[in-house]
Amino acid sequence: MSEEPKNLKYVAKPETISSLASLYGLSRTTLRNNIKKLQLLPVLRKERRYIFTVKEVQLIIEHLGEPEKA
């Protein structure tokens, strides 16, 4: 017996701000502003990096919800 596929959710993986913005259907600036409003930047950016780690992406998804274009 095979199980029917359940609603597939986004599986967190390392992402850039551009790729995350694309998933949410937002501009990079809007996504960055949303992250600032949630006060996640101090948690996310302990060091200056180009790519968000899996844990950082999970934290963003936890606060902003599942991306529509997963």
Image (cartoon, grey):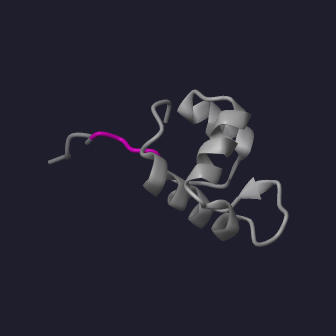
User: For the point 64% across and 69% down, which residue is it?
Assistant: 43
- Taking depth in this image into account, of 44 and 50 the one nearest to the observer is 44
Q: Quadrant of residue 50?
A: bottom right
User: For the point 19% across and 46% down, which residue is it?
Assistant: 3
User: For the point 76% across and 72% down, which residue is it?
Assistant: 46
- Taking depth in this image into account, of 3 and 15 the one nearest to the observer is 15
Q: Is residue 55 above or below residue 3?
A: below
User: For the point 36% across and 41% down, which residue is it?
Assistant: 8
Q: Is residue 33 visible?
A: yes
Residue 65 horizontal side relative to residue 25, left or right: left
Q: Is residue 8 above or below residue 52?
A: above
Q: Is residue 8 magenta?
A: yes
Q: Is residue 38 magenta?
A: no
Q: Is residue 11 visible?
A: no
The magenta region covers 7-11
Give x and y (percent) for residue 35: 61, 50
Give x and y (percent) for residue 4: 21, 40
Magenta stretch: helix, strand or loop mostly:
loop
